[in-house]
Image: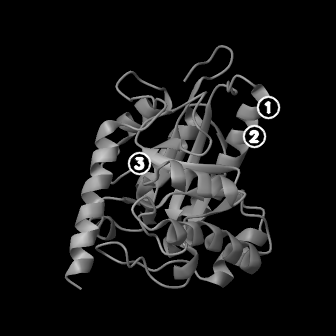
Amino acid sequence: MEHQGAQRVVPILLYHRVVRSSSAAARSPFSVTEHEFDEHLSLLRDSGARPVTVGELVALRRFAGDGGVAPGTVVVTFDDGYRDFAEVALPLLERHHVPCSLYVVSDFVGGTSSWTSDPAPLMDWSELRALADSAAGVEIGAHSARHLELDTAPADVAREEIVGSRATLEERLGQAVDSFAYPFGHHHKRVRQAVIDAGYRSACAVKNQLSPADDDPYSLARVTITAGTGLDRLSRILHGAASVAVADSGERLRTRGFRVFRRIAHRGHTGHG
């Protein structure tokens, strides 16, 4: 990170699960242990990080005009809304005074993550309402209704996933839901426009790159934190090391190619019932 003047590149960290034991983490590459997450947050604190939510980052960049923000700015995000967020991650976030953005799959609240190879329990409405009513510094955003690949879904289905998830969350939580995260990070121009039309103020992709000052607020680059992300790697991410790529504008050719592959695979699957 820059320490003189405005910071031009921001690391937006993407977590999924924080689990108590290494045996639980071993079941999924997207899990980190309680001890590892505690170390990650300690590193943020010791590095002089200034954590903000996604909504706050977008607002700060708009206010700055040129996208530059205060040195040390970093964003912590969680996708899916796993129950262990409330049980394990949240107490550590509060202890280290780190706000975050949590993206929830509205139709699966209180259920399990059936879209994963190892489904795990998700937070229920009482837990989410308690979180919304608290002063924990958690921005609750939408992660679609059913965690579909929106860029290969029919336009009307994708639109309902985007609009419906926001409406459900706002009704059940009694607060505005202004940020969205694309399931699997997959999106394209039509999906992005549907998010804008639905009234969101920001949306997160993945990209596994750092977010530059001119990053699209409706396709924010994030870096996925996995079971293999050690402190050395996290330190390089936080300090914008040359080994960590910075996102550029536009969609990469291989992203478009992978979408075509997924669309064909989906048609083949549905064709066989």
**Residue corresponding to mark 1:** 63
Instruction: Report the Cα–Cα distance between label 3 and label 1.
Output: 27 Å
- What residue is pinned by disc 2? 59
> On the picture, is 9 further left or further right than 68?
left
Q: CA distance from mark 2 to mark 1?
A: 6 Å
Instruction: Tell me the kind of residue under disc 2.
Output: Ala
Circles 2 and 3: CB atoms closer than 8 Å:
no
Mark 2 or mark 3: which comes first in sequence?
Answer: 2
Q: Quadrant of residue 68?
A: top right
Where is residue 54? Give x, y as percent. Answer: 65, 47
Residue at the location (60% across, 52% down)?
193
| Real-space CA distance between mark 2 and mark 3, rounded to the nearest whole angstrom | 23 Å
Which amino acid type is marked by label 3?
Thr
> Viewer-nearest of labels 2 and 3?
2
Looking at the rendered structure, the secondary structure element under dot 1 is: helix
Quarter of the image for the N terminus: give it. Answer: top right
* 268, 111: nearer the viewer: 268
The residue type indicated by label 1 comes to: Phe
Res 224 label: 3
Question: At 63% from the left edge and 23% from the top edge, which residue is drawn?
Answer: 7
Q: Residues within 10 Å of mark 3 (few under 14, many from 20)?
A: some
**Dot 2, how many residues are within 10 Å of its Cα: few (below 14), some (14-19), or many (20+)?**
some
Image coords of residue 173 (percent x, y): 74, 75
Please say if 13 is above or below 164.
Answer: above
